[in-house]
């Protein structure tokens, strides 16, 4: 009777329970975008770099960098400065800033093209942008409105320049060159070849001549302001990536993707080839007038400097091997800034002789992360032995070096857990590696390893908190157990059926442990893993998700083909529940505020079981991206879902309705946590994204 009364009271409470703290807004920052362009803002001298995920970093002092506020997630390809700042990029992206790059507003372009370059025209408020699909976009009101035009030929236009005589030039695929003498209102096609002709990548004003740089070591030269062009075949086979004029030595220096440079006279008539680093792309160049040298940066951590007009080079590869794509020269501060893939950001105060890292490049696919309670420390692990660590609640990250017995086969980490009451973390992954850190993730030691040839692989790790023990599951049906915080592991053989078990579940009510994976069988232990009992399931589908109700002891499993299984006797017997979906189900989440149980999966699937009900209701997610990880938002207990395509969803009413939170990326997320101290949401996968809470 008392239980019935309590249940009735509980059912009457949802409207009261829904009264929670206001849901915070979030400001998202992609921490490892690929930077491809940059500039120094003329009025404020602010340094700005930009690239993937519409990410823009800005600094007034070259020491502290802040993410600018943007309204997009498409990749930026180019920045330019006029009265305003204009950024262009993929999917017709055009953004405008009127406050020296602190805030950016997306403008309607009327285009879906990938815009490659934007150029300031005359008068002051006119702009031109070019890109794929033969796009030519023009603005006459300082970038607020854009008039769409086209070459009429579906080729990509790459570059815009002004000749010394004032004509405008546009270059693109198939050796195409356009010329305008009326500030882009009309265009003359002066050169167009065929598909076998390399593209024009940039224009160079070489004295009284014009040069059009291309690939395969080809240059075109014009002596009549771009009306006609003559081919020059150089000794290089590279794609020209950048060009500078060394005034001290009266020589042009052209960088290529193949690791060599082309050296030309002031008029661009004669060219010589010099090797900087064979086979390593030199992406960007800068001429330092004060020290009369050329500075270069490229892929694989290549940094280079020449003091003799490019004839000889001092080059090296930075240890972290960042791939640089753009180079800024701040003459006022006498420094160079190199930026590139995976968020890499470096500076040099001595014209490229030495470089200091401002932001580490982090490009490995990360799959698991954990926070150290009562601390700002977060660790994230993933493919190819990648371990990243943050000591400021995910705002910045450092790569933690790890040595493996066979460097050819670094571990692909699948999970990481914190050992309660300590500063220790444990992790595991194939091939046959279990590692432990006892110093808050600063260093890691291998506590178990089997050679690659033995084909041992760990794919899951879970904790049994009540018994203070950990388990990791091996792909051939073995289970390893640790009772001392991950320092030592004992192996127990359950089956030699490959890929049998992929994860585990511990019932908080009974203490029973279940191992699941392949749908027709699971293993059950009631003595903490000393002995195991096989339980057969009438289910051919693989199982990926599990949930144990801590009050009732009801156990749930779900997986392929929309399969949902329920056990009311601690896992001894199971019955299948009709779900009316056939998608793969990936994770359960209990909503404490309403008592609803949620189940999410591929294709934007969200199922909801209301308290006291047996049926599952399909809920509209507003996305068809896979939803992988459910979280509970601190302070509100709202449910947040993380998925592919940059998806982050939040429900403020127990899963009945969902709103998208802006992640500023379309990259795929694999995992996420809320940082316990700061409340920040940290999502990992193809990107590291941090959403900082802003209280309303």
Image: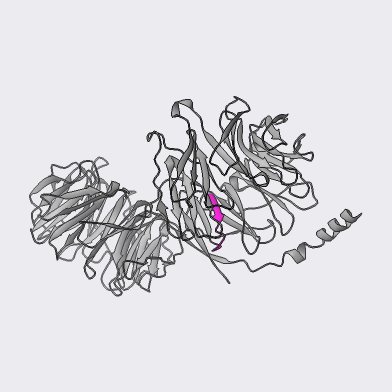
Q: Look at the image and say whether residue 561 sits in the magenta stretch.
A: no
Identified at 37% across, 63% down, the residue is 57
Q: Position of residue 323 (x, y in %)?
A: 31, 49
Q: Classify 67 as above or below 579.
A: below
Q: Quadrant of the N terminus?
A: bottom right
Q: How many marks?
A: 0
**Residue 229 appears in the rendering:** no
Q: Residue furthest right?
A: 1
Instruction: Tell me: 16 left or right of 277.
Output: right
Instruction: Tell me: 275 left or right of 30.
Output: left
Q: In terms of image quadrants, where is residue 146?
A: bottom left
Identified at 76% across, 45% down, the residue is 553
Identified at 17% across, 54% down, the residue is 305
Q: Position of residue 193 (x, y in %)?
A: 23, 45
- Scheme by which the image is coloured: one colour
Q: Position of residue 403 (x, y in %)?
A: 39, 40
Q: Position of residue 379 (x, y in %)?
A: 48, 51
Q: Residue furthest top?
A: 496
Q: Quadrant of the C terminus?
A: bottom right
Instruction: Tell me: 49 left or right of 657.
Output: left
**Could you say which is closer to the camera, residue 110 or residue 662?**
662
**Could you say which is closer to the camera, residue 18 or residue 247?**
18
The magenta stretch is 671-679
**Could you say which is closer to the camera, residue 102 or residue 679?**
679
**Residue 31 appears in the rendering:** yes
**Could you say which is closer to the camera, residue 139 or residue 649?**
649
Q: In terms of image quadrants, where is residue 168?
A: bottom left
């Amino acid at each position: 009777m008392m239980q019935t009364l309590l249940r009735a009271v509980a059912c009457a409470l949802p409207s009261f329970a829904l009264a929670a703290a206001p849901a915070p807004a979030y400001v998202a920052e992609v921490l490892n975008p690929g930077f491809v362009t940059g500039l120094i803002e003329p009025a404020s001298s602010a340094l700005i770099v930009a690239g993937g995920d519409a990410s823009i970093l800005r600094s007034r002092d070259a020491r502290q960098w802040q993410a600018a506020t943007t309204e997009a997630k498409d990749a930026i390809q180019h920045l330019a400065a006029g009265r305003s700042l204009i950024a262009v990029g993929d999917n017709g992206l055009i953004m405008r800033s009127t406050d020296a790059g602190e805030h950016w507003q997306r403008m309607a372009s009327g285009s879906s093209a990938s815009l490659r370059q934007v150029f300031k025209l005359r008068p002051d408020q006119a702009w031109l942008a070019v890109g794929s699909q033969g796009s030519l976009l023009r603005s006459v009101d300082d970038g607020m409105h854009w008039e769409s035009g086209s070459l009429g030929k579906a080729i990509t236009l790459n570059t815009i320049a002004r000749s010394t005589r004032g004509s405008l030039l546009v270059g693109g695929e198939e050796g195409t060159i356009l010329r305008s003498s009326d500030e882009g209102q009309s265009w003359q096609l002066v050169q167009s070849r065929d598909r076998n002709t390399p593209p024009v990548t940039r224009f160079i004003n070489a004295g009284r001549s014009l040069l059009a740089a291309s690939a395969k070591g080809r240059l075109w030269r014009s002596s009549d302001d771009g009306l006609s062009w003559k081919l020059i075949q150089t000794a290089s086979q590279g794609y020209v990536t950048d060009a500078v004029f060394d005034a001290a030595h009266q020589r042009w220096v052209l960088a290529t993707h193949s690791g060599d440079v082309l050296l030309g006279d002031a008029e661009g008539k004669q060219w010589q080839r010099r090797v900087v680093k064979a086979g390593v792309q030199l992406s960007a160049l800068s001429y330092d007038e004060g020290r009369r040298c050329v500075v270069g940066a490229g892929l694989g951590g290549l940094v280079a400097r020449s003091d003799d007009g490019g004839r000889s080079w001092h080059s090296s590869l930075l240890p972290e091997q960042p791939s640089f794509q753009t180079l800024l020269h701040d003459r006022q501060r006498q420094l160079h800034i190199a930026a590139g893939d995976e968020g890499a950001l470096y500076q040099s105060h001595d014209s490229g002789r030495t470089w200091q890292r401002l932001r580490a490049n982090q490009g490995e696919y990360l799959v698991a992360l954990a926070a150290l309670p009562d601390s700002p420390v977060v660790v994230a692990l993933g493919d190819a032995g990648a371990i990243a660590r943050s000591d400021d609640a995910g705002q910045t990250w450092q790569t933690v070096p790890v040595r493996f017995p066979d460097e050819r086969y670094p571990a692909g980490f699948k999970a990481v857990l914190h050992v309660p009451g300590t500063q220790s973390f444990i992790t595991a992954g194939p091939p046959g590696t279990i590692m432990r850190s006892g110093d808050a993730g600063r260093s890691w030691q291998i506590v178990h390893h089997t050679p690659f040839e033995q084909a041992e692989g760990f794919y899951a790790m879970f904790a049994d908190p009540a018994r203070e023990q950990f388990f990791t599951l091996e792909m051939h049906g073995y289970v390893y157990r640790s009772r001392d915080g991950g320092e030592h592991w004992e192996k127990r053989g359950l089956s030699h059926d490959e890929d049998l078990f992929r994860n585990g579940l511990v019932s908080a009510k009974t203490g029973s442990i279940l191992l699941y994976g392949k749908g027709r069988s699971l293993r059950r232990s009631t003595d903490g893993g000393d002995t195991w009992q096989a339980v057969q399931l009438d289910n051919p589908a693989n199982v990926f998700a599990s949930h144990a109700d801590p009050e009732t002891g009801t156990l749930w499993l779900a997986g392929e083909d929309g399969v949902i299984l329920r056990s009311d006797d601690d896992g001894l017997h199971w019955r299948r529940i009709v779900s009316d979906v056939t998608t793969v189900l990936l994770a359960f989440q209990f909503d404490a505020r309403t008592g609803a149980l949620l189940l999410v999966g591929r294709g934007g699937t969200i199922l909801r079981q209301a308290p006291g009900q047996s049926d599952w209701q399909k809920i509209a997610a507003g996305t068809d991206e896979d939803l992988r990880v459910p979280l509970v938002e601190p302070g509100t207990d709202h449910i947040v879902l993380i998925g592919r395509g940059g998806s982050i969803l939040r429900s403020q009413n127990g899963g009945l309705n969902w709103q998208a939170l802006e992640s500023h990326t379309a990259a795929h997320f694999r995992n996420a946590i809320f940082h316990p101290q700061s409340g920040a949401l940290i999502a990992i996968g193809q990107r590291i994204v941090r959403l900082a809470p802003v209280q309303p």
